[in-house]
Image (spheres, rainbow, N blue to C red):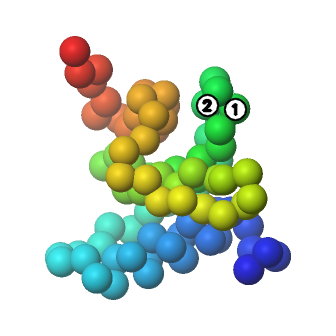
């Protein structure tokens, strides 16, 4: 597991989580690493419709799947992003 890249591990987690999902799982494009202003790093899985999943890279190297992610990520990766007031 240590030899696998964050991108590979994020894809693996996405598809493993999708086995329990209802409906068809969307195919992601190539995973991207994002860094926010506060220095935290994330792996972002997207396709042409927008963000599919975001995983935070913890300081110990473990990926943490997020239900909600920073607005910076949405601004950068979601083509349908609209700021909510």
Q: Is residue 45 above or below residue 4?
A: above
Q: Is residue 68 above or below residue 36?
A: below
For disc 1, the neighbor class at 10 Å (few under 14, some 14 to 19, many from 20) is: few
Q: In the image, residue 71 lies at what x, y percent?
A: 42, 29
Q: Residue at x 43, y 77 (%)?
A: 15
Q: Residue at x 65, y 43 (%)?
A: 41
Q: Are marks 1 and 2 in contact (CB under 8 Å)?
A: yes
| Helix, strand or loop status at disc 2 | loop
Q: Is residue 59 left or right of residue 27?
A: right
**Residue furthest to the front:** 60
> Which residue is disc 1 drawn over?
39
> Which residue is disc 2 drawn over?
36
Q: Residue at x 56, y 66 (%)?
A: 10
State which quadrant residue 34 falls in. top right
State which quadrant residue 69 falls in. top left
Q: Is residue 33 left or right of residue 22?
A: right
Q: CA distance from mark 1 to mark 2?
A: 5 Å
Location of the N terminus by quadrant is bottom right
């Amino acid at each position: 597991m240590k030899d696998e890249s964050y991108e590979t591990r994020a894809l693996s987690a996405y598809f493993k989580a999708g086995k329990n999902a209802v409906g068809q799982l969307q195919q992601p494009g190539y995973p991207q690493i994002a860094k926010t202003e506060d220095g935290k790093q994330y792996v972002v899985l997207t396709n042409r419709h927008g963000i599919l999943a975001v995983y935070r890279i913890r300081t110990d190297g473990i990926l943490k799947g997020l239900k909600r992610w920073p607005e910076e990520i949405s601004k950068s990766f979601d083509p349908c992003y609209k700021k909510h007031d």
